[in-house]
Image (spheres, coloured by chain):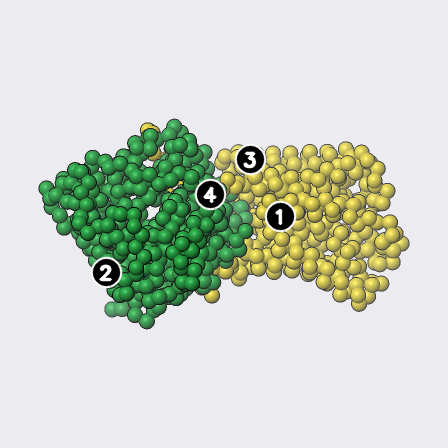
Amino acid sequence: MSKITFPIGGVHPHDSKIAAQRPIEMLPLPPVVYVSMAQHLGAPAKPVVAVGDSVKVGQVIAEPGGFISAFVHSPVSGTVKGIAPRKDLAGNPVLHIEIAVEGDEWMEGIDLSDTLVTDIPDDPAVIIEKIKACGVVGLGGATFPTHVKLSPPPGKKAECLILNGTECEPYLTSDYRIMLERPKEILVGAALMQKALGGCPCVVGIEENKPEAVKAMRAAIEELGWQQKPVRIAVLKKKYPQGGEKQLIAAVMHREVRSGALPIDAGAVVQNVGTSLAVYEAVQKNKPLITNVLTVTGKLLPAERQHNYLFRIGVPLSFIIEQAGGEPDGAVKLVSGGPMMGKAIANPDATTVKGSSSVLYLGAEDTVRKEASACIRCGRCADACPMGLEPFLLNRLCKAGDLEGLEANAVQDCIECGCCLYSCPANIPLLDRIRIAKGQVIGAIRARAAAKKQ
Amino acid sequence: MEKLLISPSPHIHSGASTQKIMRDVLIALAPAELLAVLVYGWSELLLLAVGVTACVFFEWAITRWMLKKPSTIGDLSAAVTGLLLVMNLPTSTPWWMAVIGALFAIGVAKMSFGGLGQNLFNPAIAARVFLLISFPQQMTDWTATPGFIHATDAISGATLLGVYAEGGMDALVAAGYPGNHRLFFDIGGSAGEISAGLLLLGFIYLLCRRVVKPWIPLSIIGTVVLISGIFYLVNPAVYTGPAFNLMTGGLLLGAFFMATDYVTSPMSDWGGVVYGVGIGLIVMMIRYFGSYPEGMSFAILIMNCAVPLINRAFHSRKYGRA
């Protein structure tokens, strides 16, 4: 058993990787796609097409709306039918571009062959520019624009690129599948990012419950003849949230990111393996980020109805659900993402975005919360918290509305991993309250900082 | 699907529950209590039945008629209090005294503070001390009741600690210590003191089930061993030694099962160490210099009072704030 792991807290949910043995399949094209303008962290993108325009696959349809923002490309060829607000996963209106699909005509210059391109451009700026132009964002969950993360502010230097292949969330298998099926592309993507960061070493972190992925990635290093290059695989202990950025840095580099600081302050840049694949495709193949892999899974689905789909971004979830044979009996909740940090789907007509990783069906027994009872002060929440917080205390401070106390007890450091609520024997909605309080405290901290500047 | 369930993450739960935790504590205590029933017979069985039933009944009655809230007896915490109370009583205790103890434990020590999770003092210990002060004669009468098996030759009228408190080391030697007292099996006293081995077994079960952590018991035991070791080495003619102090006076029952009570012990590991050392110090001071023979109950109650302060002083290590 691997001993490499983060030092504080963590929980051990059953990994439930039931879709792991299902190879990646190509999802057919739907009649219509809806491309969201807010599928990355930061400012929404601004449409640059008009209703009635013809677009090709890979054509820019929206440009960044700010420094932290990203290009959006058309995932299909066809005609722009509308640019209007449409409900997202949670039911909130977000600007979408609706495109009626006609054929499948790609932009010129996009290399659709399987040929592996291993030549790395000499100029880091070229790599970063390509990544930006192709709209690559982090696919590990936060969808932070990748080119920004690869451009550390002056005076800060990346000492290690960590590729996140932990996939510590139960059920999800898309990262596992790409590590099995496209390990060389992922490694070339990592080499590109290493180059962009000025030549730092790279560590690929994979949890020990994916020995096949470890084997495939190690074999790929050998096949590429990269044994002497500064890239290695670290097998990590199976413990949630191993893939949390701060936890992964602590596990791999034995360093902690100071409270309020960024990973780069600790010399670390963490990128998901899926992002690395997107970087490869962007830089080597000129292919924008218009596809991703998503897992359709859940205990309620039989083995043959588990899927790992290569989907075009913008395909409605309802289309995927239909393609996968409809909703299983007994499902009471649909989750986009993992069961620990994913979002409950309020609107199945919502569209997929760059960061979509799953459609997870949960039955009542798995997901319906039990009624909260009295806190027995067992301390399991504090033992489980990977940030070393004391959720039982934060919960009390939340109820009392004590923002100062909450800040003093580091509520702003919460990463919302869900370990506290997951482990609470009294089913107290710890994270629900803490999440709200965290928002208030961060707001107060920002307001203070703004007032200081003036 | 007619209606989608919408709630914030996490969407799954570990399945842990208060009831499962309390059930584990009951399982852990069962072997020692079972042996007590075998050794002390009908008298102990009656106490057990009355003590547990009374605790559960009082909690049910108070939630229903006084608080007008849904009953909480399903969490099994009242049953745990009942069992611990019984294990703290001399086996010859009259049954009605167990009822009074149960009323004090549940009614005063637990429910009047706000119920499970809110009480300052461990309810079973608070009740034992209440009974000890109210009925000193019955509570220190260690006459062995006739049991179902006859392993009880060594169990006499007074506990070894009682003998020691009364007449010092000489009286202890006159009572046959250490010769014919088997420290690990039947050492006399209340049900919870009868077998250190079975208590240890129960505690190991709780450790394996990750219900408790070892720090509090280790700190208590370490402190008791250290202090009694020093005193014993300095003057073995006056002071009892580590083995004697560990095996007598409910020290292990207290250390394993009462000092580790979630509600009345510190939240952090280091806080637990301070708390355990405090209990160890107080219990040895009472035994060597106080007028009560054992002292474990008082030591735990006194340190219960310090828990809110300990919780303020000790916090878990936070990520990125070194």
Left or right: where does residue A252 sit relative to residue A293?
A: right
Q: Residues within 10 Å of mark 1 (few under 14, many from 20)?
A: few
In this view of the protein, which residue sits in the foreground, B204 or A22?
A22
The residue that mark 4 highlights is A15
Q: Measure how far apart labels 1 and 4 are at the Cα level.
A: 24 Å
- Return the mark for residue B207: 1
Q: Measure how far apart labels 2 and 3 are at the Cα level.
A: 63 Å
Q: Measure how far apart labels 4 and 2 are at the Cα level.
A: 38 Å
Identify residue type, mark 3: Gly
Q: Measure how far apart labels 4 and 3 are at the Cα level.
A: 31 Å
Q: Earlier in the sequence, mark 4 or mark 2?
A: 4
Labels 4 and 3 within one chain: no
The residue that mark 3 highlights is B74
Image hue for chain A: green
Question: Tag 4, which chain?
Answer: A
Q: Is residue A92 something one can see in this rendering?
A: no
Identify residue type, mark 1: Leu
